[in-house]
Amino acid sequence: MISREDVANLAKLARIDMSDDELDHLASELSVILDAVARVQEVANSDVPPTSHPIPMTNVFRIDENRPSLSPEDALSGAPASEGQRFKVPQILGEE
Amino acid sequence: MGLTYETLLTKYEPVLGLEVHVELGTKSKMFCGCSTVFGAEPNTQTCPVCLGLPGSLPVVNEKAIEYTIAIGLALNCTIAPYSRFARKNYFYPDMPKNFQTSQYDEPICSNGFLDISIETDAGVKDFRIEIERVHMEEDTGKSLHMGGATGRIHGADYSLLDYNRAGIPLVEIVTKPIVGTGKYAPEVARAYVAELRDILRALGVSDVKMEQGSLRCDANVSLRPIGESKFGTRSETKNVNSLRSVERAVRSEMLRHGSLLDEGKRVIQETRHFHENTGETTAGRSKEQAEDYRYFPEPDLAPVTPSKDFIEKIRSSLPEKPSTRRKRLQENWQVPDKEMAAMINADVLDLVAATVELGADPTRARGWWLGEIARLANEREVSAGELPITPKDVSEIVMLIDSGELTDKLARQVVEGVINGEGRPKEIIANRGIKVVSDDSALLSAIEKAISAQPDIAEKVRGGHIPAAGALIGAVMKETKGQADAAKVRELLLRHLGQS
Amino acid sequence: MIVNKSAIEMSQLLKDGEISSVDLTKAHLERIDEVDGQVKAFLHVDREGALAQAQLVDTKRKSGEKLSPLAGVPLALKDVMTQRGIPTTCGSKMLEGWRPPYDSTVVTRLRSSDVVILGKTNCDEFAMGSSTENSAYFPTRNPWDLNRIPGGSGGGSSASLAAYEAPLAIGTDTGGSIRQPAAVTGTVGVKPTYGGVSRYGLVAFSSSLDQAGPCARTVLDAAYLHEAIAGYDPLDSTSINAPVPPIVAAAKDGNVKGMKIGVIKELQGDGYQPGVLKLFNQSLEELANLGAEIVEVSCKYFDYALAAYYLIAPSECSSNLARFDAMRYGLRIGEGSAESVMNSTRAAGFGKEVKRRIILGTYALSSGYYDAYYGSAQKVRTLISQDFKAAFEKADVLVSPTAPTTAFKIGEKSNDPIAMYLNDIATIPTNLAGVCGMSLPSGLAEEDGLPAGFQIMAGAMKDDRLYKVGAALENALVNKWGGGILEQAPRLGAK
């Protein structure tokens, strides 16, 4: 069971505004989905190692050398706003 | 704030945690081939990968792995046979992907230590700082906060983002809680960062310039009542941009925590910002609710499994440890511990060594760097290394003294000139017309002049009262505008008065 | 009509000088004009670019330059692959109008092969869905019945093939998004071994599951396309550094005598449309007649595959889609602080399904829930890989129906997420284990006369086996039907 408050917290973590209606709908939908997917716990014993990479590979590296960068025009080509060759973003409230 | 440092220490003991971030001096970024050269025009060193454009993928820089392992080995860490990258998920405009590719529960190096020494009232004391982990991550872009009064984030109207530094390889070195430092916590913190810096410099993995941000220190401080085993609430202080700031920040936080605890108040777990000008910290983001970073293994990167051979190859190519080097220098120069500590504290050891390497006598080299030059550095509130005078200059000056072209006194004028930016020693000597008067006949005429001016003193010297010669020597020095070699003057004077 | 031919037939005509690439491209552009108003497979048609590329190929050919087998043949590209300067929307409002400043490796390789890219095809938003109804723009329609879905997420690519708007297409497959659309449109689609085709420039949905792959009307066409795009890419750390398996040769060989074909017990029965199962069994008979040995295998953990997938994919996507924050590219909506603009943009720019998966994924990764959800799902993944490994010791390839049903009506399942997710029940295990899979037409289901697909799966880097078996079956069925299955589709357009 996932409550509406849980969903509201998750929406905050995921940076998505949601209306009360949306929160309610999602809470009920996700409760159903979570019930269904929770069955993974039935077989996930401690002696089974998790897989994060389907095809095992290790030590994939590149040589420390320079490759051409994008031109600043290309880099900024999608920018909703820019100033002085920098991306312009609204006032940041959080601390760095 | 009535609590003094001394009083604080009768009640509480500090626990420190130091997190140091190092920018690696690789040619290319952590996950892409963009240049890492500092100071380029904004957004000229970016690509789909470090901009986090949709569809882009990271590829690990091999040199960054080598450097990180070298750092781990130099810090006596265990190098993990299997380690992985992980995503640290949070939103911030300077992070193009809104997650940082870092390491979580499988860091590449762990469980090491670093031995440091500090000067205490009871002599030199050694501390072993335990290292929890050394791991790799990527740096963020840089923001300019516009429209506000201070250029800081508070009160800014908007921000401008440059992603040139996004993706620069970073190594994070985290200590285990440092206990048992007592009143020397600030010094220990400083000494740790200084030693770490020297090691990193010796390894050649970074240019470790704190002022430029290639070496950053976050200081975690907490207090607990003496005898208590539980740790107190800690605060994390950022923006600590020099060795001196490390020391001051730790001390300031100790006092702040102490005052709060004494007043029965609670220390808030938060991030604080250190201010160079006041030497104190102000509150930043509250960390009461630890951010949920939802770490999970980075699916776009393969695990790193360095072979024993690979690690041994790096180990065998490690340069001499700074501590080993220092021991070697101390033995070669036959210098007592206290003087070694003084050189390290004044941050002139490398400068002295470089000067000796250029041919100067160790004692003389030390004398200059620890003496006159350190004094002038203090006057200007900078470190000796930041002054325009170089080991080459000092070695030249020592040689000129040896060849008789300069006296100690005149040399001081030359040193002052170099530090004032007037040029190199030879230029200053020429421009200022500095010249030793060593011509015997010139000196003799000045000596005779002095004797005839103070006959009764001359008589005393003839009578065997040698100390009285001082007044006559002084007169000669004055007559020669300080350009005579005082020792030579004394020799000639005494001979002239029949006393040698 | 020229547009009805296979890619290889078109290639031969080009080589023989019977038609120029420019004329071939024009014919396809005309076809698009004729039918796409109804099918709505394309989000963007790059007329200029396609004709310019075609012209270039014609010039090269005239000068006697040796060209690749697919040179001058047109292709449709799923809109999650970046193409420099061409709108790449991923079926989302978030990227409306975004023109990437770089090409995906797949596009780079298509260019080196002188393939002519006609345009970008519609898909479920950020590749999340099984019907293309989640596209923020419009649903694509199944050329077999314009009131039905073409499958998803890559419905646009498969529909464009079935409507003869292109002879080749590129799709991407995370849980079945190439194979399931192929099944419901009567076309061929392949998910290569994970790491077989570069993901550089493939806008990530679920990083450990995504793969780009070839779509076509015939197995041989898909084989040529597969070889053109596959192979190691140093820009993709998950790319396999090994030679591409001999795919075209296998497609031409098509000899299944002595091969063991493993039928997966768990991927049939309840939930599968009877007509679909009947076609599946008939296809098995054909293969048996050709000398293959049919064996039954059991992969008991496959019952948990759907659950594991719907934890892993949303988790990875919640992280992959975090970059869409209105700061550097894409939509920007709202006033106030950066945080506020991020929140309002993501609310406006993402559709319902995407939001649902982001929230689900955020939950599955969050502190306190990681072990129970994401962590457990990753363990199920191991069990499924072990199931495959054991099964591949008993058989050379494994088979099942591609999807449990034929194409459903538009709107029929869009309010029931779980019902929608069940479309992927047979395709998902392949992605979880990273092995390869193909869907090719098995026939028309007797209930509704709509196409169903036969799925073949093979072990990692054994993609050639898919083509060997696929070619054999295709050949047998085409002989049985007296022509390709698409010849039985309703006629679209004026002609």
Image (cartoon, coloured by chain):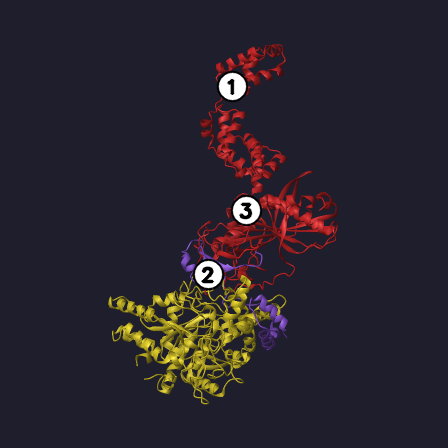
Chain colours: A purple, B red, C yellow
Image coordinates of residue B307 in percent, x first then y, are 52, 56
Picture residue at 60% right of the left edge, 17% below the top: B470
Residue B210's disc number:
3
Mark 2–mark 1 CB contact (< 8 Å): no
Work out whether C31 lies above or below C198: below
Image coordinates of residue C55 in percent, x first then y, are 28, 69
Picture residue at 51% right of the left edge, 36% below the top: B354
Image coordinates of residue C435 in percent, x first then y, are 48, 72
B147 or C468, which lies in front? B147
- Camera-near label (3 vs 1) is 1
Three-letter code for the amino acid on which mark 1 is drawn: Thr
Q: Between disc 3 and disc 1, whose residue precedes?
A: 3
Crowd class of label 1 (few under 14; some 14 to 19; many from 20; radius 10 Å): some
Image coordinates of residue B431 in percent, x first then y, are 45, 28
The residue singled out by tag 2 in the image is A81
Question: Regarding mark 1 in the picture, which secondary structure is present there?
Answer: loop
A84 or C25, which lies in front? A84
Q: What quarter of the picture does the N terminus of chain C occupy?
A: bottom left
The residue singled out by tag 1 in the image is B480
Q: What quarter of the picture does the C terminus of chain C occupy?
A: bottom left
